[in-house]
Image (spheres, rainbow, N blue to C red):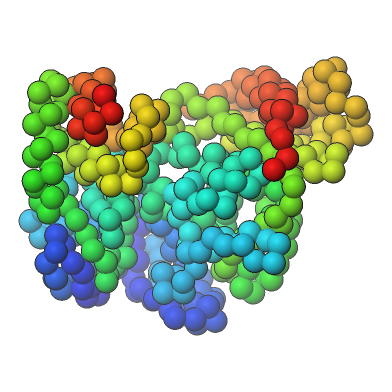
Amino acid sequence: MQIELTVNDKLVTWDVENDEFLADTLRAHGFLSVKKACDTSCCGLCTVWMDGKPILSCSILAMRAHGKKITTIEGVSQAAEEFARILTAEGAEQCGFCSPGFIMNVLAMKNELDNPTEDEIIHYLTGNLCRCTGYMGQLRAVKTYLGVA
Amino acid sequence: MFTVLDMAQPDKLEEAFEILTKRKNNTILGGCAFLKMSKKRIGTGIDLSRLNLDYIREDNGFIVIGAMAALRDLETNALLRDAFGGILSQSVRNIIGVQFRNGVTVGASVYSRYGFSDLLTALLVLDTEVELYNGGKMPLRDFLQKPYEKDILVQLRIEKNQRLAAFSSFRKSASDFAVLNIAVSNLDKQWTIAVGARPGRAVIAETASRALSQGHLSAEEIEAAAKIAADELSFGTNTRGTAGYRKALCQVLVKREIMEVLQCKSN
């Protein structure tokens, strides 16, 4: 079927399969920041925004994106870079494979929550797994970025 | 991977139901996160996105939740955060992550009657009705005992009363499936205790609920009711815990949640 959607502020028309998931569609069209890792909807690496809300693109059918606004990290590069610099300064970046999804969720949290507490930050980021750096460095970076350190 | 041969996005419920019943393997699609892990071969997948069923609102003394409301909507909705001690919001808040809950739906969680469901356990101790397109309205507890029939869950209707309630789930790690989940509520001295992720589907501990409602809520009676609940329900073993472990947990958690409800103040 054909879907029409906005990806990073650009209107596109794509042909998708009925059982195709959005992460695969995005990757097929060159948005390679979108990663897939767990196959069980629990790692958060495929996080993109749909109408501003963070979603797991690996678990949302592409046809559900019809008429929606999709944002990947390519579409918010300035904010992503600002946070990434803090993240690396805290030593909270090693292989980087989980970073695009993680950063998209951090930016979504910044838009959704005002001055979150540490518990609220952890709760919001629970669905983003990292298997090499560790979460303490990430938490320090997030708090610095949000100005709640 | 599951496969979908055709896709339908009907504008009317009657059209959706017609497609659903036309062929055996035609299926309603919720968020698809669980379906994704199956090998189901679907003839026509029916997407309800165009039916505007993603609401949560108050209507004539009921809180009404549309089938396509996301679990994250339950978590953040002001009406639900206030009602019944916020147990519906609490029951979903540890289900994987924010992104997952933005994509999965209330309708699919309830209609599929998943054993691991945290939401079903919480809904069971409230005065919850399920409204089906073909089957009409019925109490959730009746719906859970019915055999699967092809139908469309349109919305949930929860009587908005002064019921006090508490929920807890026991998890080995945040965002994992629960080893066990418990909900307890009280209205006009009538108590309801529900236990889910046994790992079977959530059920009401009827004998324990009755015993608690007839007593004076002394420490001994609360202890006894918790033991009755653990004795009357059946538990199973899976990778997250043995039946014996769940039974032991059940007694402790039921007692805690009864104590929690006793501490609640009516608002």
Front residue of this view, candidates B66 and B82: B82
At x 28%, y 32%, the residue is A129
Q: Is residue A61 above or below residue A57?
A: below
Is residue B147 among the parts visible in the rendering?
no
- Total number of numbered labels? 0
Q: Is residue B247 above or below residue B182?
A: above
Residue B186: x %, y % from top left: 77, 39
* Residue A131 location (% of width, % of height): 23, 25
Give the left or right position of residue A87, taking residue A53 as reference: left
Q: Which residue is drawn at 81% across and 23% down?
A: B222
Q: Quadrant of residue B243?
A: top right
Does B239 sit left or right of B113 as displayed?
left
In what quadrant of the picture does the C terminus of chain A appear? top left
Report the front residue among B267 and B98: B267
Q: Which residue is most to the top?
A: B220
- Point 24% across, 31% down: residue: A147
| Residue B182 x %, y % | 64, 33
- Judge whether residue B158 can be spotted in this image: yes
Q: Nearer the viewer, residue A110 or B240?
A: A110
B180 left or right of B136? left
Residue depicted at x 23% and y 23%? A140
Residue A98, position as x, y percentages in the image = 19, 35
Query: Quarter of the image holding residue B203?
Result: top right
Q: Quadrant of the N terminus of chain A?
A: bottom left
